[in-house]
Image (tube, coloured by chain):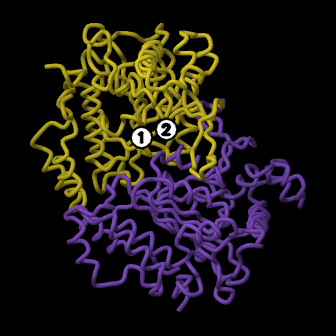
Chain colours: A yellow, B purple
Amino acid sequence: MRRIFNIRIAWIAIVLTCLESGSFKGAAFAQRDALASWNAGPAKQAITAFVAAVTKQGSADVVPPAERIATFDHDGTLWAEQSMYFQIMFAMDRVRALAPKHPDWKTKQPFKAVLDGDLKALAALGETGFLKIMPLTHWIVTARHPRFNRLYTELVYQPMLELLSFLRANSFKIFIVSGGGVEFMRVFTERVYGIPPEQLVGSSGVVKFQLLPDGKPVLLKTAQIEFVDDGPGKPAGISRFISRRPVFAFGNSDGDQQMLEWTAAGTGARFMGLVHHTDAEREWAYDRKSAIGRLDKALNEAKAKNWIVVDMRNDWKRIFPFEP
Amino acid sequence: MRRIFNIRIAWIAIVLTCLESGSFKGAAFAQRDALASWNAGPAKQAITAFVAAVTKQGSADVVPPAERIATFDHDGTLWAEQSMYFQIMFAMDRVRALAPKHPDWKTKQPFKAVLDGDLKALAALGETGFLKIMPLTHWIVTARHPRFNRLYTELVYQPMLELLSFLRANSFKIFIVSGGGVEFMRVFTERVYGIPPEQLVGSSGVVKFQLLPDGKPVLLKTAQIEFVDDGPGKPAGISRFISRRPVFAFGNSDGDQQMLEWTAAGTGARFMGLVHHTDAEREWAYDRKSAIGRLDKALNEAKAKNWIVVDMRNDWKRIFPFEP
């Protein structure tokens, strides 16, 4: 995978941020296009205008760095939508491959269900049971997508990686706010997006602290769902984990509608964005009738309220980092 | 209140951190004692030795900046233990004082219960109902402590403010992990400790997203408890909010024991500290038999495992910032 986050440039950006104000920094970055994979158009224009407005000293829209909170949905916003079906198939493959080294899995759930091919029993264990497989199998770092024959972690959107870097260089603090399991995401978000694990908000199960007989403390995952970070759960998760209301939010489906509404309802300058999957050739085209990542009500609201809708086909010059 | 966080010094520290490695920074700080309110002794020595070890390039104990997570309990660790009784009394006072401006409070809980003096009804509303009063009344920024005749937010520990600054200057990321309500703390932690609201882990109630009839989105607090961040809840909260295991943790009671155990069980250099309230003259003296902030089992474990126990009377030259 192409190295997206050039450490040296990030480092220089930090030093410049420390040393001087917006204007000096702006001059240093003027030499290159921070959003090179975005075609010129209303979406790119709206992003750069917003960032310029909130970072300009003396501007009426200026937002202090501590309040520059940006939240991004994950699936379909930062990387290609990963259907649960694919995730389950790959996780099951990995469990089968690792089983010879773990004789106890034959009698231990959720592994037993996987090895028996008992999808009914696996489903009965719920999302939490399923999430238990994920970190153990680390499927995500080895599994390849059947259409692109690429690692799943390569199916990230190049324009979004540039947007994350651009926001960071302008002192935004970025959080992923996803309906996915938070443990699952933590395996790779720091490496892939430069977003540390403490800046993830996701769905979670109840964990219990226990001392083992030898005195070693462990956190045990239970089957009880603690929090579902989707739809109306997203503003609740933001309130719980971040507290501050975002000034910038990006999603791609009706599951992100409330996060965008919550962002929009704050005072001062705001940016609400939706990725519209319109490119069947390079990625996929889906919206109102899609079972996964449905974009229907949120699209209506975006149009009514002039939120930014990214037309993937027209707005993104390049979609994936591996494209030539 | 004396300004504890000298903005200019913090700024210089950031620039130095950006520009150069530990040695250069060390030289710049050698001129003054970053922990001036700590008497020389084993506690101060252990803190400075730990920070030196984990920040020294090439040291066997070095910890990368991203993993320098420090967690602090709040009540009795960063500021004087605030008994729930005092909190309720002050909050009720404030509600009564503000009531003439809010005629709807006469019929609206939890205000009605307060105005009726109906403690039973108030208690029935639970912690969540009680927490509703807190941000509204902002009692904390106006209430004075009956013994010291000082604002509650002045009853912070000067040595701990210095420790927070010292850790920050050495690239630690600091979280408060408290059994208290997270909404309550968010009113003042940034101003008082320099700890932003997204770096607080605390107890919480379920909040629900709703669109009002006029389309305005709101988050409604419910009476349902979501998470109790105390005792075994602290490692669970750390896992959920921070994910990374702390390398440095400070508490003062048995409610912090599991957080310290969780911290200690990681690999590499670790610092586990307890504040022992031993100064009846300048603050309070309490430990094994105290109803609030009981320090009993954790004290035994600290002694058995050589965790650092701060003897407030001997280790702290000054306790509160307002002392001469």
Question: What amino acid type should be assigned to the residue bearing mark 1?
Answer: Phe
CA neighbours of label 1 inside 10 A, class few (<14), some (14 to 19), many (20+): many
Secondary structure category for the residue under label 1: strand
Look at mark 2 in the image and give the residue it sits on: A201
Above or below for B236 versus A307: below
Residue A317 vs residue B212, the one in the foreground: A317
Residue B246 vs residue B164, the one in the foreground: B246
State the image quarter where residue B85 is shown.
Answer: bottom right
Q: Residue at x 27, y 66 (%)?
A: B56
State the image quarter where residue A303 is shown.
Answer: top left
Residue A8 in the image: state x and y as whole percent: 16, 48
> Which quadrant is home to the C terminus of chain A?
top left
Above or below for A147 versus A302: above
In this rendering, do the residues under marks 1 and 2 share a single chain?
yes
Look at mark 1 in the image and give the residue it sits on: A175
Residue A294 seen in the current view = no
Question: How many callouts does the rendering have?
Answer: 2
Q: Residue at x 38, y 48 (%)?
A: A68
Secondary structure category for the residue under label 2: strand
- Position of A110 with respect to A138 (left or right) is right
Q: Is the C-beta separation of discs 1 and 2 under 8 Å?
A: yes
Question: What amino acid type should be assigned to the residue bearing mark 2?
Answer: Val
State the image quarter where residue A285 is shown.
Answer: top left
Q: Residue at x 36, y 41 (%)?
A: A195
